[in-house]
């Protein structure tokens, strides 16, 4: 996912037709074709195609339609990665994970019917404000910890948590998107190099087997970037970045609050087994003091 993708503000008067579980009825309907949708403005451009605002004609349900070109996917040899992304994301239902409702294809294209995130990409907001305050950052950390606990419980490792892959719902709630690098690993152990350079954990750089604890490293890097405005190990060259990551050469500017420094330091541990577990991220005193997490109405309905 490039740093140029965006999902701007929602169209007013969105009509939502849902069943009791909060899922749009069209997600379990017959097979779709492009004729079932009214296509609106483009929301973003990617390497393999574009994302459009769209409305399903019968239900009037607003979605984001990701249109991918088969030729481009085959040329890059990422058919397996796309298949994996679809299989994983279609089975995840959590208020802080972008839903993949369904997909269909024709001779030239593959279409993914995705939840529309009206407030767009977190990266764009971070670019505008340069840094986030404690409340915003702590809220994001709680949302991420909860969503990743859900993923890990289903033996799914995301492996590419970064601002570009995080979208925002109508109330500003976080939505993890882009499961292109994620993997369903029943053993929760992998050995592939993937993810974004600044966010790569030491075990991936060193070519060691990795597990779900790579996501703990990534949220530590993210927490730092949200508060400081750049990732902690950012350097002039790839080699220097790699060196700093492997050494965990972590330096905090004085602007980073002590509580946040404590949390980040406990996540950015060279030894994956020493990283703070997700349940303890949610329960961390700094997160508890500053988070203002809001659950969307559909999520609240399932709470007794």
Image (cartoon, rainbow, N blue to C red):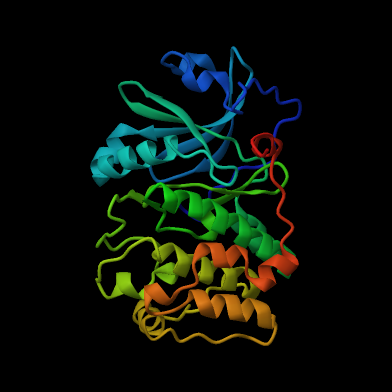
- Residue at 30% x, 51% y is 185
- Residue 100 located left or right of residue 300: left
- Left or right of 167 in this view: 244: left
Q: Nearer the viewer, residue 298 or 160?
A: 298
Residue 210 spot, x, y in % from top left? 30, 65
Which quadrant is the C terminus positioned in? Answer: top right
**Residue drawn at (31%, 56%) of the image:** 188
Q: In the image shown, does 74 or 257 lie closer to the viewer?
A: 257
Position of residue 176 in the picture relative to residue 168 (left or right): left
Quarter of the rendering containing residue 239: bottom left
Could you say where residue 288 lies in the image, as x and y percent from the top left? 70, 66
Q: Which residue is found at the position 36% from the left and 28% from the top?
A: 109
The location of residue 10, given as percent across then percent down, is 69, 35
Q: Is residue 268 left or right of residue 138?
A: left
Residue 303 in the image: above or below residue 18:
below
Image point (31%, 37%), residue name = 83
Q: How many marks?
A: 0
* 45 shown above or below 191: above
Query: From where the camera sits, is residue 101 visible?
Result: yes
The answer to whether one can see residue 130 in this image is: no
Whether 229 is drawn above or below 154: the answer is below
**Position of 287 relative to 118 (above/below):** below
Considering depth in this image, is 267 or 107 the residue closer to the camera? 267
Q: Residue farthest to the front?
A: 304
Q: Position of residue 165 (x, y in %)?
A: 51, 53
């Amino acid at each position: 996912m490039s740093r140029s993708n965006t999902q701007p503000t929602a169209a007013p008067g969105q009509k939502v037709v849902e069943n009791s579980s909060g899922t749009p009825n069209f997600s379990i309907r017959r097979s779709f074709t492009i004729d079932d949708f009214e296509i609106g403005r483009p929301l973003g451009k990617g390497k393999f195609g574009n994302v459009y605002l769209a409305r399903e004609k019968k239900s009037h349900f607003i979605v984001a339609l990701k249109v991918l070109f088969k030729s481009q996917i085959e040329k890059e040899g990422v058919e397996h990665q796309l298949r994996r992304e679809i299989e994983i994301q279609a089975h995840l239902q959590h208020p802080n994970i972008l839903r993949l409702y369904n997909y269909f294809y024709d001779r030239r294209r593959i279409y993914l019917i995705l939840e529309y995130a009206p407030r767009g990409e977190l990266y764009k907001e971070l670019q505008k404000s340069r840094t986030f305050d404690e409340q915003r950052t702590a809220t994001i950390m709680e949302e991420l910890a909860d969503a990743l606990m859900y993923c890990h419980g289903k033996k799914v490792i995301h492996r590419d948590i970064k601002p570009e892959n995080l979208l925002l719902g109508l109330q500003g709630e976080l939505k993890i998107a882009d499961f292109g690098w994620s993997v369903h690993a029943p053993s929760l152990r992998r050995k592939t190099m993937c993810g974004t350079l600044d966010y790569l954990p030491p075990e991936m750089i060193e070519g060691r087997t990795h597990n779900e604890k790579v996501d703990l490293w990534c949220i530590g890097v993210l927490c730092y970037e949200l508060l400081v405005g750049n990732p902690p190990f950012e350097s002039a060259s790839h080699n220097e970045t790699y060196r700093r990551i492997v050494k965990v050469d972590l330096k905090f500017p004085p602007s980073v609050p002590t509580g946040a420094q404590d949390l980040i330091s406990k996540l950015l541990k060279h030894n994956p087994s020493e990283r703070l577990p997700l349940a303890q991220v949610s329960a961390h005193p700094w997160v508890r003091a500053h988070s203002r997490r809001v659950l969307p109405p559909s999520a609240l309905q399932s709470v007794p």
